[in-house]
Amino acid sequence: MTHPSTSAAAVLSVRHLKIDLVGGAQTLVHDLSFDVRPGEFLAVVGESGSGKTMAARAILQLLPPGIAQSGGQIVFDGEDLTAAASRDVKAMRPIRGPGIGMVFQEPMVSLNPVHRIGQQMAEGLRMHTKLSAIEIRARCLDMLRRVQIADPERCMHAYPHEFSGGMRQRIMLASVMLLKPRLLIADEPTTALDTLSQREVLDLMVGLAKDQGTAVLLITHNLGLVGRYAQRAIVLEKGKLVETGDVPAILVEPKQPYTRKLVEALPRRQAAKPAPAAPQQPLVQVRGLCVSYPGPRAGFFKRHASVQVIDQLDLDIHPGEMVALVGGSGSGKTTLGRAILRLAPSHAGQILFRGDDVRSADRAALHRFRLACQLVFQDPFSSLDPRMRVQEIVAEPLRHLPALGAAARLKRVHETLDEVGLGGLGARYPHELSGGQRQRVAIARALVRRPAFVVADEPVSALDMTIQAQVLRLFQSLQAHHGFACLFISHDLAAVEQIADRVVVMEHGRIVEQGPRDIVFDRPSHAYTQALLAATPRPLASLAEPVCCSSKKAFT
């Protein structure tokens, strides 16, 4: 994809766009103006609530109920979409799909779970072209091959739930690009994907857009992706455009304080902790652990062979150590964390905590083990009881400390809330907090008992860069203060590089590499670790050779 000429006529022009809550109670987007030229890769950057998605939905006239465009123009290929949509509700049908395509943030929500993939891919071609059923099927199969689906024929007959997140996002991309839109809007298309899947999906998007001459509007809070793929960026803060320009200038020399704050929030490697003076006995020891699940049914009375998720795995975690567990989706990271806490079944091996095997522990010993361990879930909103106030949620683990009186319990709760930066918010409910604040509640609940061991399962994967930086700093300071050991499960190697003492790399249920953070990151020995590191977007390092301007091997 070559850099578009600045003199080329814009394929999309947004002028003085204003979006309000119905009734004018709040303005969500203020006086926003920008252009997208043919073949350009433009990034829209900002934190959650900055108005990125609302602006994108306004372009397609798909604003949710209760929100309306109250001013401005959106011109696509010379046609004012706002005026056309106001005249006729059907006016946008020829635009959505052949003119402007959109890849949504969560493919499982945008793919219909009750229809097969082939039916959903063919729908747009049936509606917007006069191709025969045979031609439509041939085009769908060809596009599935181009997005590197291994078995297109089987995919056409499968349902969305039969695929991983990365595969579903590829299918969504294939469906959108079948109609060869002039503009592709990608709304946080890789938020929930691991590093390798992120790169594969974005590389596919860039390659398809280059082949078809499609302009791309990438909505993201990930500056790493911006540095690797985009040519130009606009930065939004609370619905206002605060800075725009070429990506190198914005990332290297940001002019506005808000942009500087975003760049400064990028994870950075911290100095390694000094090694303990004397060898320590591991707090957690995993020996020969095996976890498998029953295979799918092959008939009424038969099943396929069981699926081995973790195979003969050994792992040590020492007191006060931050061990990062990394790997692609499906590598067994979360299963291992849950198996160690006895929240997932294991069928072979040992899990030793302070020398005692918790796999064979009786009920009393297992209870003591779980009191000394805690789990921070990936999605705090689904793990917090919406009917309980924050202080009640944080106090809940203290029920198992009968020696702690009511006054001491309340004091401990307030101390913990103050530690995580939520002092004064104990009377609120989870829905009254932001995503970052809810994650702090989850951390406070995990630490209020002063556990010896914490498993943190993707605790920052869905957070903005600035909130992610705050949570990582909080985690580091709390660990330094309380001295707990932590298994930090993540696919975000940038976050791992900032927080980890030791890195363990998993692939297909096995550990392929482990060692001190600096050695694993600077001198990786296994090909899979090298691939993970190569796929991790590093904004400033990426500027030397933007991917969007170079040829892609998959499409040559």
Image (cartoon, rainbow, N blue to C red):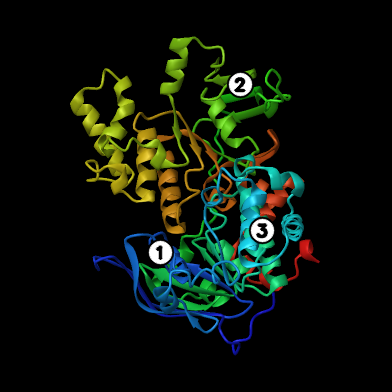
- In three-dimensional space, the C-alpha distance between marks 2 and 3, rounded to whole angstroms, equals 38 Å
- Compared across the picture, whether 389 is left or right of 190 comes to left
Quadrant of the image containing the N terminus: bottom right
- On the rendered image, what quadrant is the C terminus found in? bottom right
Q: In which quarter of the image is residue 539?
A: bottom right
Query: Which is more toward the observer, 48 or 397?
Result: 48
CA neighbours of label 1 inside 10 A, class few (<14), some (14 to 19), many (20+): some
Q: Nearer the viewer, residue 131 or 469?
A: 131
Judged by depth in the image, the label closer to the viewer, 1 or 2, is 1
- Mark 3 is surrounded, within 10 Å at the Cα level, by few (under 14), some (14 to 19) or many (20 or more) other residues, namely many
First of labels 2, 3 by sequence position: 3
- Residue at 64 percent across and 58 percent down: it is 175
Q: Which residue is drawn at 55% across and 54% down?
A: 269
Residue 274 x %, y %: 54, 42
Tag in front: 2 or 3: 3
Q: Which one is nearer the viewer's eye here, 233 or 264?
A: 233
Q: What residue type is labelled 1?
A: Leu
- In screen coordinates, is 187 left or right of 298? left
Mark 1 or mark 2, which has the lower sequence index? 1
Give the residue at mark 1.
63
Q: Estimate the spatial distance between the alpha carbons at disc 1 and disc 3, rounded to whole Å.
A: 24 Å
Mark 3 or mark 1, which is nearer the start of the sequence?
1
Q: At which x and y percent is residue 384?
A: 36, 37
Q: Is residue 40 left or right of residue 524?
A: left
State the residue position of label 2.
346
Residue 329 picture location, percent across and down: 62, 42
What residue type is disc 2 on?
Ser
Rendered view: 333 above or below 340: below
For disc 3, the marked residue is 174
The local secondary structure at tag 2 comes to loop
